[in-house]
Amino acid sequence: MTAVRTFEDLVREAVDAPVDGWDFSWFEGRATEERPPWGYARSMAERLARVSAALDVQTGGGEVLASAPALPRLMVATEGWPPNVARAAALLHPRGALVVASPEDAPLPFADAAFDLVTSRHPVRTHWREIARVLRPGGTYFSQQVGPASVFELAEYFLGPQPEEVRRARAPRRARAEAEAAGLEVTDLREARLRMEFHDIGAVVHFLRKVIWIVPGFGVERYEDRLRSLHERIEAAGAFVAHSTRFLIEARRPAGRG
C-alpha cells in the first residue's frame, strides 16, 4: 500500500529538486502539458542540418539544442544564468558547440552577418534588431515563444486578477510588428493554447520555482496559506487545470539587405 504524502512531504520534495536547465522530467506522473502541434525541436533540427553557422539564443541548459541529431560546422549558444551556462557547456561542448555567457539584455557578442540561422525556444525577450544584425542576408530566425496570458489560471490564483495590459503582453501580432520594424520578413506565425494539469502541490511548487516569471518573487513561506488551500483543492477535486499559450515565429532577413 502506497503511503499518502503530506503537504509538507510534497513541498519539501519540490524545494529540494534542482531547477537549473530546461529538463522537465521531474514532472513525470505529477503534471502534464499538451505539446504544440508544430514540433519545434524537430523543425529546429531540420533547419540546423541545412546551414553552416547557427546561433541558439538563451539556450537554457542546452537540452533542446542537444536533441538535434546534427549540428552545423559552427554552432554557438548563449545563456545568461550561470548554473545554466555550466550545464549547457557540459552538454554541448562534446558536440563541438560553443557556449557563451551573455546577459539576456546585453547586445549579442557577435559580428554583423555572422549566422545563417538564429534559433530560440522560450526567450525571455527577443531583441529583434540584434537578431537582424547577426543574421546573414537571406538568413532566418526560428523561435517558439510564450504567448499572452500563459498559465494565468495559476498566476491569478496567487496574485489575483491581472491588468489587461499584462494579459495582452507577448502577443504574436506585437512580435510580428517588432520583427518587421527591425527589417525582417515574417514568413510563418502560428499560435496554440495548450492544456496543463498539476496533479499535486509539489508539481505546482517546482513549476513556480523553475518558471519564475509566472509568479514573480514566489516563495513557499510567502504563499504558504494559498499553497495549503490549493493542496486541499487538488486532494478533493483532482488536478488543477491551466492553459499555456505558445506561438511559433519564423522571420527572414531579406537577401538584398547589405
Image (cartoon, helix red, strand yellow):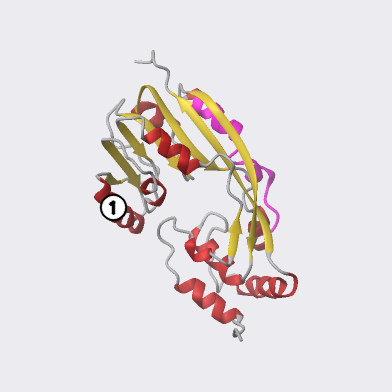
Residue visible at 59% across and 85% down in the picture: 3
Q: Where is residue 150 drawn, in percent x and y?
A: 62, 49
In the displayed structure image, the side of residue 160 where residue 103 appears, left or right: left
Residue at the top extreme of this rendering: 256
Q: Main secondary structure of the magenta part?
A: helix
Residue tagged 1 = 89
The front one of 175 and 86 is 86
In the displayed structure image, the side of residue 123 where residue 103 appears, left or right: left
- Does the rendering let one see residue 65? yes
- Does the rendering let one see residue 125? no
In the displayed structure image, the side of residue 251 where residue 49 appears, left or right: left
For mark 1, does the 10 Å Cα neighbourhood hold few (<14), some (14 to 19), or many (20 or more) residues? many
Residue visible at 40% across and 60% down in the picture: 20
Q: Which residues are magenta?
A: 159-179
Residue visible at 34% across and 30% down in the picture: 51
Q: Where is residue 135 drawn, in percent x and y?
A: 36, 27
Q: Where is residue 55 drawn, in percent x and y?
A: 34, 37
Check residue 89 for magenta coloring.
no
- Quadrant (top left, top right, bottom left, bottom right) of the N terminus: bottom right
Q: Where is residue 211 drawn, in percent x and y?
A: 51, 57
* Up-down relation of residue 155 to residue 201 (above or below): above
Check residue 164 for magenta coloring.
yes
* Up-down relation of residue 81 to residue 54 (above or below): below
Task: Name which quarter of the figure residue 32 lies in.
Answer: bottom right
Q: Amino acid at mark 1?
A: Ala
Residue at disc 1, secondary structure: helix
Q: How many marks?
A: 1
Residue visible at 38% across and 44% down in the picture: 68
